[in-house]
Amino acid sequence: MSSTHTEELILLKNICKNPTVDALIQAVDHQDKAMYTDAYASLLAVDSECSFAEFLCREILFDDNLFARQAHAGNLRSSVSFAFAHDLVILQNLAKFITGNGSNFFTESGLPAIGYGKDNPLFESNWSDPKSIEKISEFFHKNGYGMFIGHKAFTYSSGTLKPVLNPSDITLSDLKNYESEKQAVLDNVENFVRELPFSDMLLYGDKGTGKSSTVHAVLNFYAETGLRAVEIQKEQLGVINELKETLASLPFKFIIFIDDLSLEERDEKIYSLKASLEGSINAMSSNVMIVATSNRRNILKENFSDRENSVHARDTMEEQLSLSDRFGIKVLFSSTGKQEYLSIIKQLAEDKKMDISEDTLFALAERWAIQKGGRSPRRAKQFIDYAFSCLSKGIQIDF
């Protein structure tokens, strides 16, 4: 039996699978200096060599376990709370032992000591105190659990959700104009998160008009209410129902996001997508919404030669409409004219408080659009970023 009694953990066994924690347990049990120094180096890397208690608390708060899941869902059972409190006693004793008697062999050999430090603010001095259980439960209820804490965007691969470590932080206020388009998307997502009737969405229109950015901004707006997003590539459409079943068991609202969607008309993935949208036995799930963006309203590409056959052309059109119409809401993001483009330029420049006359700004912005191939919100942002950098460095805006 281990001197740390961690084999008696009920819900928080994963804490001891953390490489640093495991190395420390093995080190003190076997008086292994190499494992102790490896663990100490790991604590140094995260600035926790003097606060091992806080390190353990953080691991507990980000662990995926039954207590965290039930607390988030608001259906915490007393027996689960009791098991969680039992585990907190063991882990706090582990922190005290590692930083106390357990490290004597190593410190007497000249190795540096690991400090207990201070407890996380959510933990009372006695971690298993009912006040701790209440505060930790509220933390999970508000923030989620495991990888869903601090992560709002995910990818899906080999049956596993993987957090996106650097998601877009764009906000709705960063997106200029397109007010009715943004509102249509926002209203539907609000219905979704409030458990009102909602529809899957297709955002279509010219490239660079802000379709994907609007999805990212709406995700950021509702993330604190439990909205999450899983982005899949069009090559993954075959697993979309598998993904929906995985997400159905989780207590969050998920957008399945498919960016820049287009399919060849004989692509078998068409049927996977159709089977995931309204009209099939796998259709609507109360916690999953499918949102796709495309540069074309008719997602299916039609070959020119197909138009020569009037019967085939009619079948193709019906197939196109059948797929597109399964998105209950379709929002068009049309290209910008000169007036709209310069309006976006002006607003972005005001946000950055750029010291430049409007006439000069507009003249440069127009030249940028001509050289870069057209006017769009994306072109406007690229120009403003470039111009702002030039002004910040005190150099001429030249391109």
Image: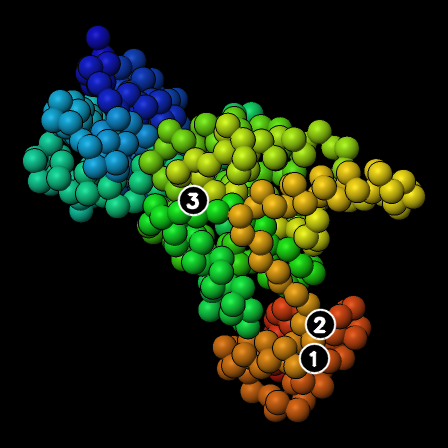
Q: How did the renderer colour the structure?
A: rainbow
Residue in front for this viewpoint, 144 or 56:
144
Residue 228, numbered label: 3
Distance in Å between CA atoms under marks 2 and 1: 7 Å
First in sequence: mark 1 vs mark 3: 3
Residue 249 lies left or right of residue 315; in this view the side is: left
Label 1 near label 2: C-beta < 8 Å?
yes
Q: Earlier in the sequence, mark 2 or mark 1?
A: 1
Which image quadrant is residue 35 in?
Answer: top left
Task: Characterize the local packing of mark 3: few (<14), some (14-19) or many (20 or more) Cα atoms within 10 angstroms.
Answer: many
In the rendered structure, which amino acid carries the disc numbered 1? Lys
Which callout, 1 or 3, points to the residue nearer the camera? 1
Residue 338 shows which numbered tag? 1
Report the amino acid beneath label 2: Arg
Q: Residue shown at 67%/34% (left/top)? A: 270
- Return the residue at label 2: 375
Q: Residue furthest top?
A: 1
Residue at x 17% of width, y 24% of height: 80
Q: CA distance from mark 1 to mark 3?
A: 36 Å
Q: Residue at x 20, y 32 (%)?
A: 75
Q: Position of residue 216 (x, y in %)?
A: 51, 54
